[in-house]
Amino acid sequence: MLIIDMHTFLVEGLWRGEDLARRLGALASRAREVGVPVLVPHQVGPPGDPFDPDLPGREVSPLVGIGPEDRIVPKRATDSFWETGLADHLRSLGTDTVVVTGAATDYCVDATVRSATSHGFAVELVSDGHAPMADGDPEAGIAPERIIAHHNSVLSQAIHPGGATRLVAADEALR
C-alpha cells in the first residue's frame, strides 16, 4: 500500500484533508493486519524548497498514524517510482498489485498510478483515498470533487499492457 505525500502542511490544504488522513490511517491499520506492507512515498526538496524536510509541517501527518514498521520512501518527483528504488522493493516483496492513496490527486497520485502500470504492476486506486488541494484548480475553474471524479474515471480506463487500474472504495480495499 502506498500513502503518497501526506505531509502535515499538505493535509491542512487538501480538500477534506483531515478526513482523508484519518481514512488512510484506518486503511494502513487494515493493511498491517492482513500483512500488506505500508510504504510512504514522501516528497523532499533541497534547502529553501517548499518540500525542504527541515521546514515545519514536512513530516507525515500524525493523523495518518504511520507505524515503526512502515517505510518512508523519499522522492524528488511527482512519480513515486522515479529514482526511488520503489519498483525493485515492491518486486522483492513479491508484490504484483499496488494500492495507491494520498496527495495530490492531480499530481503525485496521477503520476504514480501511471508509473506503476508502466512498471508492470496492477493498481487498486482507492477512489475515496486521494484528494487535490482544497481550491481544486482555480485557474481552470475545476472544483476538487470534479478533479477526483475525473482522475478516477481516466485512470481506471487507461489502457496499458503493464498493468490495469481498478477503483476500490476505502471500506472495500485490502479485503
Image (tube, helix red, strand yellow):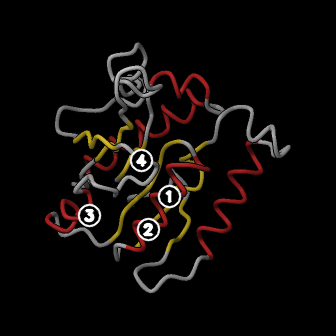
Residue at image mark 4: 77
Task: Verify CB contact (< 8 Å) between mark 4 and mark 1.
Answer: yes
Q: Earlier in the sequence, mark 4 or mark 1?
A: 4
156 or 47: which is nearer to us?
47
Disc 3 on helix, strand or loop? helix
Looking at the picture, which amino acid does disc 2 mark? Answer: Val
Q: Is residue 84 left or right of residue 160?
A: left
Residue 128 at x, y percent in the picture: 59, 49
- Which label is found at residue 111? 1
- The crowd level at tag 3 (other Cα within 10 Å; few <14, some 14-19, many 20+) is some
Looking at the picture, which amino acid does disc 3 mark? Answer: Ala
- The crowd level at tag 1 (other Cα within 10 Å; few <14, some 14-19, many 20+) is some
Q: Is residue 157 above or below residue 146?
A: below
**Total marks placed:** 4
Residue 79 at x, y percent in the picture: 42, 54
Disc 1 on helix, strand or loop? helix
How far apart marks 2 and 1 lie (CA) works out to 12 Å
